[in-house]
Image (tube, grey):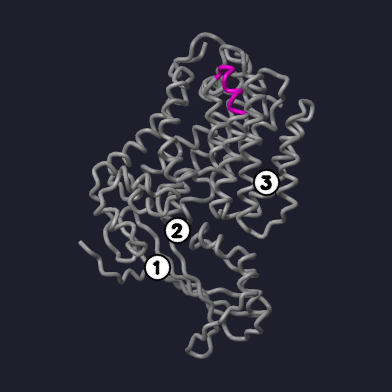
Amino acid sequence: MRMSWARLPTTPGPLSEEFLDSFGKTAGIILQALTWDPKGVAPRQTRIIRLLLHIGIVLDAYGVYSMNWGFDDKWMIATGIVGALVAFPRLQRLSTVLLLGTYIRALMAGYPYTWNHTWLGAVALLFLCLGDPDDEESCGLMLGGLRATLIYAMFGAAIQKILHGTYWRGEFLALQAPGMQNPWFVRDFLMTSADWALYSNENAWQSGMRIAPNSPVLIFASIMTVVGELVAGVWMMFPRTRKPALVASVLLMLPIQIAAFEYLFLGILVTLLATLEDRAWIRFLVPVLGFTNIGLVIYRVAAGG
Amino acid sequence: MKRLQAYFLIFFIGWVSIWVPTHRYLTFRYDISPWKLGGMAMYCRKGPIYFLDWYEQIGDEDRYIDLTDADRDVLFKHSDPGKMIALGTLARFADSVHYLIDGHGIQNPLVAVIQRSAYSGRRHRYVDHSCRHEFIRVDGEIVENRVCRRVDQRIIAP
């Protein structure tokens, strides 16, 4: 048995030892960690994940097409139709392939201004397209791919925050807060009134001043954001810590969603997070996410886009 | 097909392991937007702020080209704002240059002056840059000369 540093249980995942061995030791351990599925629920989980991802992608495509990059509404309608084909069990895979086609069209039409989560959504769809929904091993690899995408989103973002170095003194949050969708969250809970007065001035950056806020809560929250993303990202890599990673991610994402209101990313994010949970209750996320996403879009449109 | 899935998964992990530091390098070296190109550096740094103006160089003087709304629509469809924001100093404007030179019948050099203000995490402040792109048609081909300099003439508060 492999499984040294990964500390995996002896219960085999969906992939056979021979298959894993053929990729070499390191790649084999990574594949096993990402696809680990002791309860054998990967096929069922994949069906739910596919529904969730289709909801998130169609609504994200709505966002792309409504951002006035010279698109035709016909593509929005086409995306909705091919995405909805997932409701027919025999057409699920075809639906995902067609959805990937329309989504790549949206991705390339916006290039190079394409949003980061659109790249993530396209990669997630590609992982689903490559797999066979009737094969347990293939479903395990599909879920493994989506988990890798999630780890990239979380751990990659943490590494970038460290590399850019704008979180240790709270300077990024101070500059960004006034431009957020719900600035009251940062203003009322994290920043002193003096800092808010300084950084809410749209021309603050033009003064050439050194950006160094004095709000202790803001600085603490800023540092904890990086630490939280880093810890959650590492936990996601190991099968035994998927559940704590899920809890940590939800706790981390809630305030970020409240402040920044990234409602188009929400669908894709919830889908990717759902790959960390193997119990049947995640099926309830499908109607909850569907109605929540539609409600948020209506709210956003009613609020003026 | 399973093998293809597994290879793609391994390739994806390898690719993102390289792309994160590369994206960070491009962000600082060429001012590409941290928020774009799938580098997961959104919410890491405020993107640069840009001002783009077009001029026709007549002798030693630059004459401002007053763009009409129709011109702006066409330039927007060439995605100049998106290119500039996402690709920083790597952005090229070949479509827009052809449109302006041919559409406005410009015989003299066409000049694009791009001023950008990029947040420097290392220096904890915004730093200004100014680039002057000169485009001239030589034997039917558009040739570009570019000169960039750091402006940084702001009063720096302690």
Q: Which residue is mark 3?
A: A104
- At x 63%, y 53%, the residue is A66
Q: Mark 2 near mark 1, Cβ–Cβ under 8 Å?
A: yes
Res B129 label: 1
Q: Mark 2 near mark 3, Cβ–Cβ under 8 Å?
A: no
Judged by depth in the image, the label closer to the viewer, 2 or 3, is: 3
Q: CA distance from mark 2 to mark 1?
A: 10 Å
State the image coordinates of residue A134 (x, y, percent, origin top left): 73, 20
B102 vs B40: above or below: below
Callout 2 environment at 10 Å: few (<14), some (14 to 19), or many (20+)? many
Q: How many marks?
A: 3
Chain at numbered mark 3: A
**Residue A213 part of the magenta segment:** no
Judged by depth in the image, the label closer to the viewer, 1 or 3, is: 3
Q: Which residue is mark 2?
A: B31
State the image coordinates of residue A258 (x, y, percent, origin top left): 44, 41
Q: CA distance from mark 1 to mark 3?
A: 34 Å
Q: Nearer the viewer, residue B105 or A172?
A: A172
Q: CA distance from mark 2 to mark 3?
A: 26 Å
**Residue A283 part of the magenta segment:** yes
Are dots 2 and 3 on a single chain?
A: no
- At x 60%, y 25%, the residue is A143
Helix, strand or loop under label 3? helix
Q: Counting residues from the N terminus, which is met first, the one under dot 2 or under dot 1?
A: 2
Residue interval drawn in magenta: A278-286
Chain at numbered mark 2: B
